[in-house]
C-alpha cells in the first residue's frame, strides 16, 4: 500500500513539473521575436538563385550577341542582386562558401562594369562594339564571371541541380562568324 501511495505521489509530481516546464517554455517562446534579428523573411536563397541564374543567362546572351548596351544593363542588374547577398540578412541565409563566391562575383562584376564603361567611352554607344572574343581580357573576365555566377547559384541552392538544367549557352564559344 505504501508503494502505491509513493508511486501516485511521484506520478503527480512528475506531471506537475512537466506541465510547469511546458508552460514556461511556451511563454518564453511567445516572448521571442518571430524573425531573428538581422534576418528577413524577404530573403530567399532559392529565389535569389533563380534571379542570378536569369541574369547569368542574360549576360551570356548579350556576350554572344556582342551587345555592349545589354551587357551594361545586365551588369547593373547584377550589382543590385549581388548587393542583396552582401547585407547581413543575405550572408546569414547562405553557406560560408556561397558568401565567398558572392564576394568574388561582386569583384568580377565591378571589374566588368569598369571595362564596359571604358569601352563605351572609347567606342561610343554602338550596340555591337565589343572586341572579338579572345583578343583581350574581356573574354576571360566574362567567362570567369559567368562561371562564378553559376557557382554562386549552386551555393545558394545548397548543391541542388541548377534551375532549368545546364547553362543554355556555352560560355567559351565565340559568336558565329568569328
Image (cartoon, grey):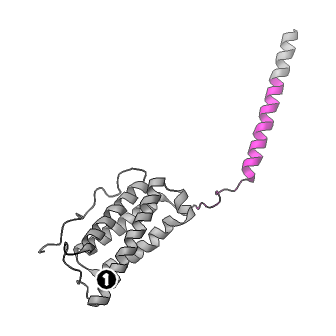
Residue 44 at x, y = what percent?
Answer: 50, 60
Vertical comparison of 63 with 3: above or below = below
- Name the residue nearer the viewer: 68 or 167: 68
- Name the residue nearer the viewer: 177 or 143: 143
Vertical comparison of 112 with 129: above or below = above
Point out the residue furthest to the top here. Answer: 1
Q: Is residue 45 left or right of residue 126?
A: right
Residue 11 at x, y = what percent?
Answer: 80, 23
Q: Identify the magenta region.
A: 11-40
Is residue 74 visible from the viewing direction of this image?
no
Residue 128 at x, y = what percent?
Answer: 23, 83
- Name the residue nearer the viewer: 63 or 31: 63
Mark 1 lies on residue = 69
Quadrant (top left/top right/bottom left/bottom right) for the N terminus = top right
Is residue 49 visible from the viewing direction of this image?
yes
Q: Is residue 164 left or right of residue 43?
A: left
Mark 1, other Cα within 10 Å: few <14 / some 14–19 / many ≥20 = some
Amino acid at each position: 500500500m505504501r508503494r502505491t501511495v509513493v508511486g501516485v505521489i511521484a506520478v503527480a509530481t512528475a506531471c506537475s513539473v512537466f506541465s510547469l516546464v511546458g508552460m514556461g517554455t511556451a511563454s518564453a517562446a511567445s516572448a521571442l521575436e518571430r524573425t531573428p534579428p538581422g534576418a528577413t523573411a524577404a530573403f530567399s536563397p532559392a529565389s535569389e538563385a533563380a534571379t542570378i541564374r536569369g541574369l547569368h543567362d542574360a549576360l551570356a546572351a548579350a556576350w554572344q550577341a556582342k551587345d555592349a548596351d545589354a551587357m551594361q544593363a545586365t551588369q547593373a542588374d547584377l550589382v543590385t542582386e549581388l548587393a542583396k547577398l552582401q547585407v547581413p540578412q543575405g550572408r546569414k541565409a547562405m553557406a560560408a562558401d556561397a558568401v565567398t563566391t558572392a564576394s568574388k562575383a561582386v569583384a568580377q562584376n565591378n571589374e566588368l562594369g569598369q571595362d564596359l564603361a571604358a569601352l563605351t567611352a572609347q567606342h561610343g554607344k554602338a550596340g555591337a562594339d565589343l572586341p572579338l572574343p579572345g583578343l583581350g581580357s574581356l573574354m576571360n573576365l566574362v567567362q570567369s564571371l559567368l562561371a562564378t555566377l553559376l557557382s554562386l547559384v549552386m551555393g545558394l541552392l545548397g548543391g541542388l541541380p541548377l534551375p532549368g538544367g545546364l547553362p543554355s549557352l556555352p560560355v567559351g564559344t565565340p559568336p558565329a562568324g568569328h
